[in-house]
Amino acid sequence: MNTKLVIANWKMNPQTLREAKRIAGGIKTVASKNRKTQVIVCPSFLHLITLSSVGHKPISYGAQNVFCEKDGSHTGETSLSMLKDAGVSHIILGHSERRAKGETSEDVQKKISLVLKEKLIPILCIGEAERDMEGEYLSVIKNEIKDALKDVSQANVKKIVIAYEPVWAIGKTGEEAITGRDLHEMTLYIRKVLSDLYNQRTAFSVPVLYGGSVTGNNAKDIFSEGEVQGFLVGRASLDAKEFGKIISIVNKA
Ligand code: 13P
């Protein structure tokens, strides 16, 4: 597990293709100077096709979702083959913002199998809504992992990226992000769950990322203490300079 990953989740931003191209160009410049870190940008579907045809190497492109059926009459949906054809390598699945809109564990499970079958890389998002004193949040994490990986073999789980994104830390200020220490506890727990499902060796071969109010200011502490392989970044990834700071911190560490 040598690769470090920094992934941009642009969500429903920016509002114009022109702006998307400008940000991607800026990210490409930083990514070119930080080659030990794989940089993946996940724009909206509409911008994805143009951006990935422009290229921006060494950036790779990812999608923020995919439909759970391979093909058929599904108005408004996008298939995996379309995304593959558009040059996508990674697909974010089970983001809390999608789960909040009704995406179920079964949907996530189906999508993971589909993505793995087509040899693309699923980025499985997990994360509790809140932290309680009783430690119930740990069962939330365990169940999300178990449900999503229900049909995933030991050989295939190594191809997945897990992004731990506690809902309470998403879209907040940099000070409200998780502490490195709390993140370390969580990454250990995630690996324990994976270890129980598969084995220890396998558990340590799955990259675990953190997402939730990562900025150029907090990335260093979170990364050095958290035992993660990188970040899934929302807001800060829309500013090439700020995102560039995060990329170089991860690359240097
Ligand atoms: P923010 O970095 O804006 O908190 O978003 C995190 C996230 O949801 C990435 O998927």
Image (tube, rainbow, N blue to C red):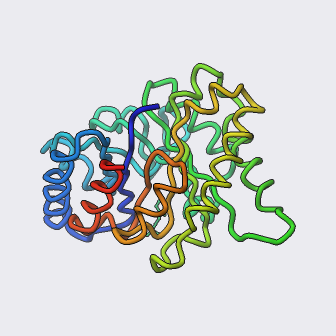
* In the image, residue 243 above or below residue 55: below
* In the image, residue 111 above or below residue 102: above
Q: Could you say which is closer to the camera, residue 23 or residue 222?
A: 222
- Could you tell me which residue is drawn at 57 percent across and 24 percent down? 156
Of all residues shown, which one is farthest toward the top? 155
Of all residues shown, which one is farthest toward the right? 134
Q: Picture coordinates of residue 40 (x, y %)?
A: 32, 46
Q: Picture coordinates of residue 101 (x, y %)?
A: 60, 64
- Could you tell me which residue is drawn at 55 percent across and 62 percent down? 180
Q: Could you say which is closer to the camera, residue 75 or residue 53?
A: 53
* In the image, residue 14 above or below residue 105: below
Q: Could you say which is closer to the camera, residue 105 or residue 138?
A: 138
- Could you tell me which residue is drawn at 75 percent across and 47 percent down? 142
Q: Could you say which is closer to the camera, residue 75 or residue 145?
A: 145
Image quarter of residue 36: top left
* In the image, residue 63 above or below residue 216: above
Image side of residue 217 versus residue 121, left or right: left
Q: Picture coordinates of residue 47 (x, y %)?
A: 25, 55
Image side of residue 15 versus residue 209, left or right: left
Image side of residue 105 versus residue 210, left or right: right
Q: Picture coordinates of residue 162 (x, y %)?
A: 55, 44
Q: How many marks?
A: 0
